[in-house]
Image (tube, rainbow, N blue to C red):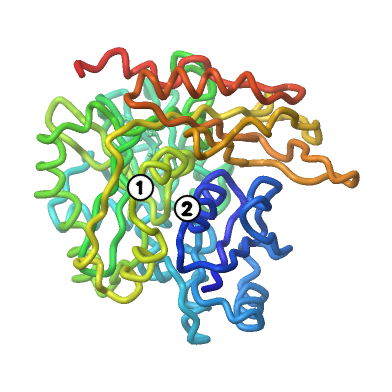
Amino acid sequence: MKVLVVGSGGREHAICWKISQSEKVDKIYCAPGNAGIAQVAECVDIKAMEFDKLVAFAKENSIDLTVIGMDDPLVGGVVDAFEAEGLRVFGPRKNAAILEGSKAFSKDLMKKYNIPTAAYETFTSAEDAKAYLETSNYPIVLKADGLALGKGVLICMNKDEAMAGVNELMLDKKFGSAGNTIVVEEFMTGREVSVLSFVDGKTIKIMTSAQDHKRAKDGDQGLNTGGMGTFSPSPFYTEEVDEFCKKYVYQATVDAMKAEGREFKGIIFFGLMLTPNGPRVLEYNARFGDPETQVVLPRMKNDIVEVFEACIDGTLDKIDLEFEDNACVCVVLASDGYPLDYKKGFEITGMEKFDANDGYYLFHAGSKFNEEGKIVTNGGRVLGVTAIGNNLKEARANAYEATAWVNFDNKYMRSDIGKAIDEAKV
Ligand code: AMP
Ligand code: GLY
């Protein structure tokens, strides 16, 4: 089989690597890819939003399966564009990707189908939002309705911050049209867990759990980022939590989408908060998480191409998803200054020591070849240093050990990825 993957981050590197393990696959292409992905796939110079070019490439090269990694093309309807030409593609159609594309949609869906989530109100006028915020309890959470690179969520400690937040999202349009509508949501407390799942329209199969670290600095300080590191499994994702979510969240979401005429095929990523009152859905994403994927796929036993195909064909009920009884930790090496200003173009050295056979992976997030053919930094998040261990503590020690193997100017990482592991009872 020939497979095309769309995207260019650490997530897509992990997906390409996992696809490369499949006996069914002879050739992998990635558009646009990066210097790390180039080790396992042929990179194609087409951007993720260039649907016509992607479709033409898939036709010309007889691609048997295309896998979409990123949210923007999914929400923009890339799957519909492929299907219109009779091409096989993994991911939700536009009318289902709205689960991630509109927070107002997903909140209304949860309310309608009694899926546990924070209480909320939706506003399309700044004036109405401000009137509501006059008499709200604080802290409170403001969310831009549309895609905002994970940065459209403001936690407001008091009324002044909330009013400023409304101005930022709705009037100054910091995230463009994503802020035309906002969701104002009850503030919840608890641990966060990321749960990825495969969905074929009617059946859902849950992958192993993971936890992200969204803030830039140690101690969960600093700005929100795409994610500075992850571990899997989450020791806080207990059987009790699993049972609750199986009963009230996972299948309920798939059934709700079907009932709305928006059959979901692809990945649903459940962002959960384990509150004192039980698990609540913080958000849905319609794609693999980044960097959750980097710690989940190395633990997955199945041939991922078989699972992708079962989702497309509606035969996921025949698949037993299996994960190794081990643990995995990913520490992101970023460019100092991320997520604001940072420099690019520094040579990366020391990459040869990583060997997946030993349980060490170096997933590239932002790298490219320079004119001399050397691999240089090309983004805020540069590399995901990922290691397997028999348990979480061992995996964490291995990952941090491996962070010293690679170097580039302005290398920055958090030193406390997986700190929650020490707080777990197990
Ligand atoms: P989201 O993009 O909706 O997952 O939000 C980004 C981050 O904001 C989450 O990972 C949480 O840390 C935080 N957050 C979102 N919604 C809430 C909420 N209702 N209460 C407390 N924290 C929240
Ligand atoms: N790591 C969070 C996300 O992928 O949205």
* Residue 370 in picture, x, y percent from top left: 84, 44
The one of 379 and 403 positioned closer to us in this rendering = 403
Query: What residue is at 68 percent from the left and 53 percent from the top?
Result: 38
Task: Report crowding for label 2: few under 14, some 14 to 19, many 20 or more residues within 10 A (C-alpha).
Answer: many
Amino acid type, callout 1: Met
In the current view of this chain or complex, which residue is farthest to the right? 372
State which quadrant residue 420 falls in: top left
Q: What's the mark number on residue 82?
A: none
Query: What residue is at 39 percent from the left and 59 percent from the top?
Result: 304
Residue to which mark 2 is pinned: 18
* Residue 275 in picture, x, y percent from top left: 19, 28
Residue to which mark 1 is pinned: 300
Total tally of numbered discs in the picture: 2
Ligand 2 position by quadrant: top left
| CA–CA distance in space, label 1 to label 2 | 9 Å
Which circle's residue, 1 or 2, is located before the other in the chain? Answer: 2
Q: Decide if ligand 2 comes within 8 Å of the CB at mark 1.
A: no
Q: Is residue 12 above or below residue 349?
A: below
Task: Report crowding for label 1: few under 14, some 14 to 19, many 20 or more residues within 10 A (C-alpha).
Answer: some
Mark yes or no: residue 308 visible.
Answer: yes
Query: What residue is at 25 percent from the left and 50 percent from the top?
Result: 206
**Mark 1 and mark 2 residues within 8 Å of each other at the beta carbon:** yes
Left/right placement of residue 78 relative to residue 370 reads left
Amino acid type, callout 2: Lys
Mark yes or no: residue 164 visible.
Answer: no
